[in-house]
């Protein structure tokens, strides 16, 4: 398992547990190794010293070759409760169950060379130390020399092995205690470390939910305290920045709304004048008639722009609200096309008796903006199709023009965005699709599901806009 998938608490527990186990193992292993060597070395030295002392009582030997009784007597003298001895002379051995052939050949060769040797080994299922030497024999007035008598003493290490087992058990017990202590220490460390981390996580979550008043309590002066201080400083700076941005945004919205409302009065007067100019334009000569028509057209464009800005300011301020009514969607779409003189330019597939509870004025605005956009920027035939299911109605507006560039699709509902940036003047304000998108989102059902407006391209060429609205919009809107 990847360590990154484990929680910090789990990793701390594992780290402390491994440290405790490793430390306990190293200490216990070192103690066990040292103690066992000391115990076995002491037992071995004792066995060698004991054999040497007992052999001193037999020195020097003069009756060679020894009889069988003499071999048995020497073996009996060297044996006791813990030690068993066997004496060998030129293939003959003392009576008993010990057989010299059971001992390693290297041990016997070292004994016959005149050395005092010992070796720890397992013998008949128990640990022993085997000590071997060759007895010396001396003449009445001369030095001692090799007698040919091989003596082997088998000293049991069962008592020492039991002591070592007790040490091993004790070391294991202390290792378990060390592991328990390490886990408890890890829990305490995790609690002290994770508490500020959890507080930081909760504070970051609240800050992400736009609660800019979130702050952390600073405890102590360690690294976690410095992290808390940094978080608080960052939150302070963020709160000031957001407050300033909100103030600037509110000022900008208020400015747009104020300017738009202030322009309505002079625009109303200008519209009245342009209505007179429209009536007189056919009688005006040459450039005067052309100028009158231009002034009238630009006045209508300016009026539409101001109305769109006022509508956008309502969305931004949260003042846009639905005025719901039960609408025959097919009849409403047909009325929108008819009122604008588009009925002959647009193909329709409008099944009858598709009813939905919508805002009829906003539905008219959305359909008009989508169809008007297709007529200005697309190519005929323009089609409007209506579909419905139990939850929503779907209106598709399609054209057969070049379609939308893939780079344009993510920005097509942005305010004042125009695909052809070189065309600084056009009939549209660049707000129609943005207003339609906002109106679609304004329609929500009781479960909170929003309406949607999506732009795309047809497989055969041309743009397609898909408008989906809930059949039962909630009166609260957004």
Image: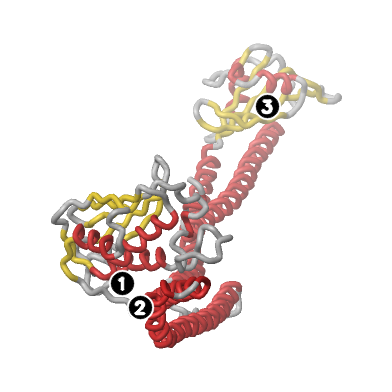
Vertical order, 63 against 6 (above or below): above
Residue sitting nearer the eye, 313 or 427 = 427
Return the disc, 2 or 3, that comes first in the chain's sequence.
Answer: 3
Residue 31 lies left or right of residue 138; in this view the side is left
Which residue has dot 3 on it? 132
> Residue lying farthest left?
353
Residue sitting nearer the eye, 258 or 40 = 258
Measured as percent of width and height from the top left, residue 223 is found at 60, 72
Return the disc, 1 or 3, that comes first in the chain's sequence.
Answer: 3
> How many callouts does the rendering have?
3
Q: In percent of the image, x 46 and y 54: which residue is there?
A: 409
Visible in this render: residue 340? yes
Classify the position of the C terminus by image quarter.
bottom left
Residue 79 lies left or right of residue 213; in this view the side is right
Label 3 SS? strand
Return the disc, 1 or 2, that comes first in the chain's sequence.
Answer: 2
Q: In percent of the image, x 53 and y 55: which residue is there?
A: 15
Measured as percent of width and height from the top left, residue 476 is found at 25, 74
Which residue has dot 1 on it? 478
């Amino acid at each position: 398992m990847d360590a990154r998938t484990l929680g910090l608490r789990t990793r701390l527990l594992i780290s402390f547990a491994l440290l405790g186990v490793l430390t306990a193992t190293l200490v216990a292993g070192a103690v066990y190794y040292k103690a066992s060597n000391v115990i076995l070395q002491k037992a071995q030295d004792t066995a060698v010293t004991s054999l040497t002392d007992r052999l001193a009582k037999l020195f020097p030997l003069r009756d060679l070759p020894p009889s069988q009784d003499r071999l048995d007597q020497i073996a009996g003298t060297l044996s006791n409760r813990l030690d068993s001895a066997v004496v060998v002379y030129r293939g003959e051995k003392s009576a008993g169950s010990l057989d010299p052939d059971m001992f390693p050949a290297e041990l016997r060769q070292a004994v016959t060379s005149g050395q005092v040797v010992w070796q720890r080994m397992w013998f008949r299922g128990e640990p022993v130390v085997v000590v071997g030497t060759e007895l010396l024999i001396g003449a009445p007035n001369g030095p001692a020399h090799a007698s040919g008598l091989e003596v082997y003493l088998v000293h049991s290490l069962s008592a020492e092995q039991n002591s070592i087992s007790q040490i091993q058990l004790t070391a294991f017990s202390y290792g378990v205690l060390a592991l328990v202590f390490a886990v408890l220490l890890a829990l305490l460390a995790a609690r002290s470390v994770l508490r500020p981390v959890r507080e930081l996580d909760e504070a970051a979550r609240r800050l992400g939910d736009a609660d800019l008043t979130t702050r952390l309590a600073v405890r102590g002066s360690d690294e976690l305290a410095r992290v808390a201080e940094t978080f608080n400083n960052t939150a302070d700076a963020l709160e000031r920045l957001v407050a300033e941005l909100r103030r600037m945004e509110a000022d900008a919205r208020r400015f747009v709304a104020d300017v738009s409302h202030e322009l309505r009065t002079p625009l109303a007067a200008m519209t009245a004048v342009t209505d007179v100019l429209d009536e007189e334009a056919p009688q005006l000569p040459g450039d005067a008639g052309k100028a009158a028509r231009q002034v009238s057209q630009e006045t209508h464009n300016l009026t539409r722009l101001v109305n769109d800005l006022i509508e956008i300011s309502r969305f931004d301020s949260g003042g846009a609200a639905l005025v719901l009514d039960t609408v025959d969607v097919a009849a409403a779409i047909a009325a929108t096309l008819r009122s604008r003189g588009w009925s002959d330019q647009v193909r329709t597939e409008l099944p009858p008796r598709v009813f939905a509870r919508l805002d009829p004025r906003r539905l008219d605005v959305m359909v008009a903006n989508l169809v008007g956009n297709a007529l200005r920027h697309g190519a005929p035939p323009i089609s409007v199709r209506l579909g419905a299911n139990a939850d929503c109605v779907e209106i598709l507006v399609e054209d057969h023009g070049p379609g939308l560039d893939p780079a344009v699709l993510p920005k097509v509902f942005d305010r004042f965005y125009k695909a052809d940036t070189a065309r600084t003047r056009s009939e549209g304000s660049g707000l129609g699709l943005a207003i339609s998108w906002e109106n679609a989102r304004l329609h929500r059902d009781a479960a909170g599901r929003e309406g949607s407006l999506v732009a795309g391209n047809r497989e055969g060429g041309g743009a397609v806009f898909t408008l989906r609205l809930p059949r039962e919009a909630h009166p609260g809107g957004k």
